[in-house]
Image: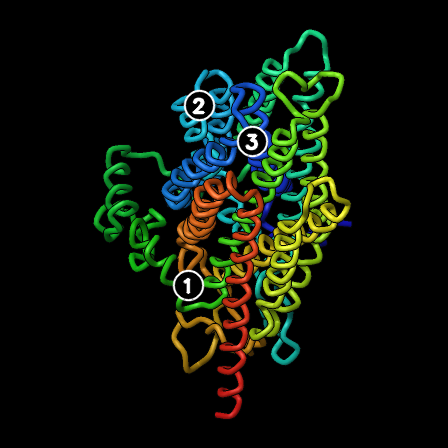
Amino acid sequence: MNLRSYLPFSRHTRPLHATTYLLGVPLFSISFLVFLNSSLSFLLTNLFSVPASRLGSIVGTLGFVDELVAIVAAPIWGLVSDGRLGTRGVSALGYTAIAVGLVLFVQLQSIYPGLVIGRVVFSLGAAAVTTMVSAILPEMTSPVRTLDADDGGEIEHAAPTGKLAGLVGLFTGLGALIGLGVFLRLPPQLAARPDFTPAQAVRAAYLIVAGVAALVALWCALGLPPPRNTDTTNTWRHIKSWIWTRVWGGDPSVYADDDASAPAAKNPDVPRGVRGLWAAATVAFDDGRIGVAYVGGFVARASSVGISLFLPLYVNHYFVSTGRCTPSDVAGERGGCRRAYILAATLTGTSQLTALLLAPVFGWLTDRCAAVPSLRTLPLILSAALGIAGFTLFSLLPSPESRLAFFYAALTGASQIGAIVSSLGLLSQGVVEVKRFDPGLGADDTLAETDPLLARALARTDPNNGREAFKGCIAGVYSLSGAAAILLLTKAGGAAFDRTPSAPFWMLAGFNALLAVVAVGNGVAVGVRERRRVRI
């Protein structure tokens, strides 16, 4: 029995590539990010002795720097992944930068500029690997073929991207649990040893996690699929061609080889470079799936960072401000900081465990709702409703030690994974276009957003044409939208945190309300257009 037939991968995807993608990219990309965000406030209190009154502003500033870098780096990494470096090279470079950034965090002995430099390097790597989560996903899927009962021909239906997005969400949740249950527990475990001071424990934990990141970089370099464009002749010509097509967005035929073998020369109309990024941004207005997916990515990234960054910060602030945790008490008799570590990890772990369990559910729901255009945003509406309830109720808690805190954390985890899986599913549905055969249509006509999904006959989409040709740019804009949300959340939320610790959670509830409005509006608009077409 072939296990591959039960998994939503293309038959051309090798088991090594699929395994490396699921275990190496979505799993570890989130685990390192969750570890850094969850441990950052403890790093400040234990290694730099920062008082509770300054935690919010410093954490917010570092988060702002992180996303300021990501907001520029994400689309560039996506653009580069469409070229000769490929998604494999970008992933390997990303994890290498993460390893270097973690080392700099504990080796540079200052907050400014030491931690800022470390955060910049880490952000460059994090932007690369998180962008590759969505950039590699379309490479792993292909349309499903069935036989036409009437003429015996083959019909290709849309790829089951929602199922694969559900798997990605599942491994994303598992990665968050590794970051919380394994990496975040290293500092208190090391601090409990007599030969470790609290500062040494934090430093050793960061170095251990950096070593793991370096190993993952090597794994990705060996296990991910190679880039499609492997031509290495005439390096200077390729450099000029890359600048002309990728940066300036010029006509690839200008630097096409005489044998016209370069993939870029096959279709000079495919947008690339700056034009590719612009096309990726404007396609949101042409296809509601991609537009809503961008907003979903906005909320998904904000929720992920909000849960992993501000929830542990909220717990640490509570223990420090009440005098139950001081830098010298990590391994002391009261164990106040150890209790803070455990509570932060448990609350965040409850959120991520819920996300892990619900990832396949949202993946299945995304694929089921895709059959009805007016209902395809329903999973995002559900996740937005859960986010509004979870973040609002958590912000009203008098103490993070309340039993209700775990239930509200679970709601936020369900909202987070719903936004991640459903937005990735919608994005991939919009990228993996399915062409329709119709005697009255040209060869390049595709299914419109509101066209019936059951076509008479379907033909395979050429990966060098359509949106798949600039899927990296689309993935970059998707990550860019998430970076914009975090940029707003970390700076404004971090500044407001020192005055009102619950402020970031109110902001996250507002973001989910925005997603609900956009998703409902898109569903209503598509439903109205469908009814009008039926009447005509």
Q: Amino acid at mark 2?
A: Ile
Query: Could you say which is closer to the camera, residue 405 or residue 265?
Result: 405
Give the image quarter of residue 388: bottom right
Which numbered disc, 3 or 1, marks the residue that appears first in the sequence?
3
Which numbered disc, 3 or 2, marks the residue that appears first in the sequence?
3
Q: Nearer the viewer, mark 1 or mark 2?
A: 2
- In the picture, measured across the screen, residue 5 lies left or right of residue 151, that is right
Q: Is residue 390 above or below residue 493?
A: below
Marker disc for residue 320: none
**Residue 89 visible (yes or no):** no
**Do residues under tags 3 and 1 come within 8 Å of each other at their CB atoms?**
no
Query: Could you say which is closer to the camera, residue 290 or residue 34?
Result: 34
In the image, residue 290 lies at what x, y percent? 47, 62
Which residue, given by chain and number where applicable, does mark 2 sit on?
A: 111
Q: Is residue 196 above or below residue 407?
A: above
Q: How far is the residue under mark 3 from the one under mark 2?
A: 15 Å
In the image, residue 307 lies at what x, y percent? 60, 44
Which residue, given by chain and number where applicable, does mark 1 sit on?
A: 284
Q: How far is the residue under mark 3 from the one under mark 1?
A: 32 Å
**Do residues under tags 3 and 2 come within 8 Å of each other at their CB atoms?**
no
Give the image quarter of residue 386: bottom right
Which residue, given by chain and number where applicable, does mark 3 sit on?
A: 36
